[in-house]
Amino acid sequence: MLCPSCHHEASGTFCNFCGASLAAAPAGAGTSAPTIPATTNAGGLSENAAAAISYLTIIPSILFLVLDPYRRMPLVRFHSVQNLLLAAAWIIAWIALAIVEVVLHFIPFISILFMLLNLAIAVGFFIAWLIAIIKASQGAWFKLPFIGDMAAKMANSQ
């Protein structure tokens, strides 16, 4: 018998997969073919979940841009490109700050200022990254300042 909620094979009075009650199932529910929601694909990830996962590191972002079911999803493609641009922006900011710190190392106590600047930049990028993950999991087309429009153009979406 198929569960009326999630369409997985179930037996007894409750579905073993989603926990829905099987008592309310129609009489012919066990013989019909399951219908798969449009938001899932062969891998089982919804578009929102894949978009949020693309922010975990650059590896899922690259994989989602290459793998066939995900590269056709505009939301996943946009968030993958935006994550790659966010990582590149963080690396560029870190390198630029390191170069300026090396050039100005002769000024007394300048290392304390650069330590605070490094901390502020890291916190700023972390907050932007966290907001982007949350918005991606909600299915929002959230564009980060400066890189969001570039990500949309590169991903050919919106």
Image (cartoon, rainbow, N blue to C red):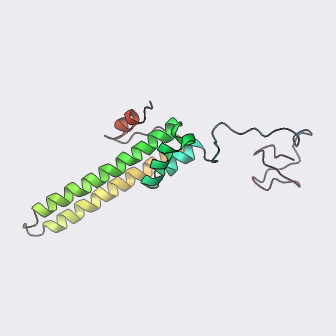
Q: Main secondary structure of the magenta part?
A: loop
In which quadrant will I find the C terminus? top left
For residue 133, say whether it is visible: no
Query: Which of the 4 image quarters holds residue 101?
Result: bottom left
- Tell me where residue 63 appears, x and y as whole percent: 49, 49
- Tell me where residue 130 appears, x and y as whole percent: 43, 53
- Please give the count of numbered marks on the rendered protein: 0
- Horizontal side, residue 50 vs residue 58: left or right: right
Query: Which of the 4 image quarters holds residue 69?
Result: top right
User: What is the residue that sits farthest to the bottom in this orientation?
Assistant: 108
Q: Residue at x 16, y 67 (%)?
A: 111
Q: Give yes or no for residue 17 being in the magenta stretch.
A: yes
| Magenta residues (range) | 1-20
- Horizontal side, residue 94 vs residue 137: left or right: left
- Tell me where residue 92 appears, x and y as whole percent: 26, 52
Q: Give yes or no for residue 2 being in the magenta stretch.
A: yes
Query: Which of the 4 image quarters holds residue 150?
Result: top left
Q: Residue at x 53, y 37 (%)?
A: 73
- Tell me where residue 61 appears, x and y as whole percent: 46, 48
User: What is the residue that sits farthest to the top in this orientation?
Assistant: 158
- Horizontal side, residue 158 vs residue 72: left or right: left
Is residue 110 positioned above or below 76 on the image? below
Q: Residue at x 86, y 48 (%)?
A: 22
- Horizontal side, residue 36 vs residue 57: left or right: right
Q: Residue at x 28, y 56 (%)?
A: 121
For residue 150, say whether it is visible: yes
